[in-house]
């Protein structure tokens, strides 16, 4: 019985590996598009039954596949739960640091108080 290798890291794939896999997917999809073009030409010369259906299918592949290939090639893998949590923590730290840099006198706090609003309305009149 084979033992499963032990995972020693939760590191994501390197950007180079991700880019290479996206390149392979793009080339594969564009090859299928080229096959649709060739198949359409062969179908026109062979005149099989249901020619219109097959030509529409090939045309749909030639139109849809480039759009999908570009979307897939430009998409990065989804962030894991740990990456999202780390990103949120970093954003909170940046926000805390920005607040710490401002002197307390410059920070205007909103106080919700009935008397405060009544005084403000009288001042505006």
Image (cartoon, rainbow, N blue to C red):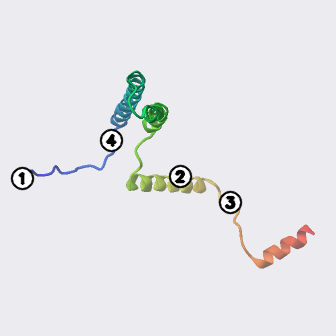
For the residue carrying disc 1, how many other residues have a C-alpha within 10 Å: few (<14), some (14-19), or many (20+)? Answer: few
Left or right for 17, reference 74 = left
Rendered position, 37 above or below 100: above
Picture quarter containing residue 108? bottom right
In the picture of the structure, the residue carrying the numbered disc 3 is 107
The residue mark sitting in front, 3 or 1, is: 1
Q: Secondary structure at mark 4?
A: loop
Q: Secondary structure at mark 3?
A: loop
The residue mark sitting in front, 3 or 4, is: 4
Give the mark nearest the N terminus, 1 or 4.
Answer: 1
What distance separates the C-alpha of mark 3 from that of mark 1? 66 Å
In the picture of the structure, the residue carrying the numbered disc 2 is 94
The residue mark sitting in front, 2 or 3, is: 2
* Foreground pick, 44 / 122: 44
What distance separates the C-alpha of mark 2 from that of mark 1? 51 Å
Give the mark nearest the N terminus, 3 or 1.
Answer: 1
In the picture of the structure, the residue carrying the numbered disc 1 is 1
The residue mark sitting in front, 2 or 4, is: 4
The image shows residue 105 at horizontal and vertical percentages of 69, 60
What distance separates the C-alpha of mark 1 from that of mark 4? 29 Å
Contact (CB < 8 A) between labels 3 and 1? no
The residue mark sitting in front, 2 or 1, is: 1
The image shows residue 121 at horizontal and vertical percentages of 87, 71
Which residue is found at the position 26% from the left and 49% from the top? 9
* Foreground pick, 107 / 56: 56
In the picture of the structure, the residue carrying the numbered disc 4 is 13
Give the mark nearest the N terminus, 2 or 1.
Answer: 1
């Amino acid at each position: 019985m084979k033992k499963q290798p032990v995972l020693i890291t939760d590191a994501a794939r390197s950007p180079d590996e991700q880019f290479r896999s996206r390149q392979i997917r793009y080339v594969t999809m564009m090859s299928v598009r080229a096959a649709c073009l060739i198949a359409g030409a062969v179908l026109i010369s062979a005149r099989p039954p249901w020619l219109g259906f097959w030509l529409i299918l090939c045309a749909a592949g030639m139109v849809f596949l480039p759009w999908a290939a570009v979307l897939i090639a430009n998409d990065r893998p989804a962030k894991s739960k740990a990456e999202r949590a780390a990103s949120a923590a970093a954003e909170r730290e940046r926000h805390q640091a920005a607040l710490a840099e401002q002197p307390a006198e410059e920070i205007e706090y909103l106080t919700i108080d009935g008397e405060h609003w009544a005084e403000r309305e009288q001042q505006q009149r």
